[in-house]
Amino acid sequence: MTEPSYEVSLSVNGVPLTANVPARRLLSDTLRHELGQTGTHVGCEHGVCGACTVLLDGQPVRSCLLFAVTVDGQAVTTMEGCRAPDGALGPVQRAFMECHGLQCGFCTPGFVTTVTAFLRDNPAPTEDEAREAIGGNLCRCTGYQNIVASVLRAAEILREESP
Amino acid sequence: MKPPVFDYHRPVSVAEAVAMLAAAAERGGAKVLAGGQSLVPILNMRLAAPAALVDINRLAEELAFIEVGPDRVRVGALTRHAQTEASPIAFAALPLLRQATRQVAHPTIRNRGTTLGSIVHADPAGELPAVLLVLDGEVELASATGTRVVPAAEFFLGPLESAVRPDELAVAASFAIPPGRTGTAFVEVSRRAGDYALCGLGLVVRLGEDDRICSARAAYISVAGTPVLVDLTDAVGGQPPDGADWASAAVLAQAAVDPEADIHATADYRRHLVGVLTGRAGRAAAAATVLVGQS
């Protein structure tokens, strides 16, 4: 017996995309394997590490804990969607680069998506709030100090660049 | 793929969902998928292989709600933790809901996981089962043959085991608003922020007409297979909230629990935490005694 597949339509970073997937295909794997969006990284695959975090209708969620079929019709923002409109690095990405907020970079997509949503909701966070915001993302390289600095720097950049 | 194969059902109404659960119950049973923040890890690790999943995420119109009545707060099965946490009306009526929900995993998990899902999952370390118990909560269950309401005291049967039958859908939980001046607190200790608690409790203090404590009750997590309700009134009843004998309450609570050791903590350490956290929660709840649920 072949496994039934379902047509899933997503708006990925504003682009309508469609995939045919079995019900058990995770959103993380659908993004990477079916849709070629390899900016989303897959770490632990059980919701602990946060590397696969994407924005679902603007809210951060673990893409490894969602079936693509469940979110049919919804809007997904990945790391690629956190770039500047001209394709250059976005404000959060630039802050991570400036502050050395990454070393190997594996966890970074989850941080960038999480921080992008966080700064939209809280444009001037305290250091404590910045730490709380990234509490669900693991990084094994940096020791987090530079990531906290990156969050605060990204907030500055966003303020400087807001009209 | 990580998860095992399952038959997938995507109902668009509660009536359709319970019909699918009834049909699936004849063929090996189905699990209900709401937020999936506990279920999907279990599937990804292949610790479970349900024959079918009934995905209720299309039932938001019927099941994503928070209703505040004069005596109770009702939370629907598709209300995410983040919505419960942010709800001003739920916070005004029952601050304990926000106090406890803030300690559920991380914000990203709370964006997807549901309040009722945490209750039905019945993890011994879960915060919301303790809230249901200490607030005299109930769970409303629907099936193809009707509905029934199960009080919290009869809902939790064992670790990860609730009273929901294979053909039933938990549609809402309701929590009683304690009468009069009430203060609440939820405190826990975990090895890492957002991780499973080694011990924790939700505590409700009520003041009488004389401004003295007339009731103090707490529900403890991670000290048994199900949350443990302990009445602390014998230790602090009749005392003023700012000078109550929480040390005696701590001793009373320690005598009422019988924790087991595991790789995370010894039984003695958990019992120690029961004492320390009872004092911490008692003082915080007493300090928060404010008018709740009164106009």
Image: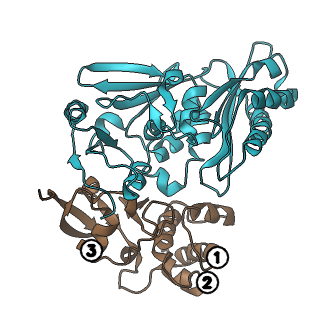
Chain colours: A brown, B cyan
Q: Amino acid at mark 1?
A: Ala
- As rendered, which of B192 and B23 lies closer to the eye? B23
- As rendered, which of B133 and A14 lies closer to the eye? B133
Left/right of residue A150 with respect to residue B84 in the rendered view: right
Q: Earlier in the sequence, mark 3 or mark 1?
A: 3
Q: Give the total of numbered labels.
A: 3
Q: CA distance from mark 3 to mark 1?
A: 33 Å
Task: Determine whether label 2 and label 1 are within 8 Å by CB.
Answer: yes
Q: Earlier in the sequence, mark 3 or mark 2?
A: 3
Chain at numbered mark 1: A
Q: Which residue, given by chain and number where applicable, does mark 1 sit on? A: A149
Left/right of residue B116 with respect to residue B165 in the rendered view: right
Q: Amino acid at mark 3?
A: His
Nearer to us of marks 3 and 1 is 3
Which residue shows up at 43% across the image and 51% down it? B37
Chain at numbered mark 3: A
Q: Quadrant of the N terminus of chain A?
A: bottom left
List the single residue furthest toward the top: B209
Q: Earlier in the sequence, mark 2 or mark 1?
A: 2
Q: Which residue, given by chain and number where applicable, does mark 2 sit on? A: A99
Task: Determine whether label 3 and label 2 are within 8 Å by CB.
Answer: no
Q: Secondary structure at mark 1?
A: helix
Task: Determine whether label 3 and label 1 are within 8 Å by CB.
Answer: no
Q: Secondary structure at mark 2?
A: loop
Q: Which residue, given by chain and number where applicable, does mark 3 sit on? A: A33
Q: CA distance from mark 2 to mark 1?
A: 6 Å
Q: Amino acid at mark 2?
A: Cys
Q: Secondary structure at mark 3?
A: helix
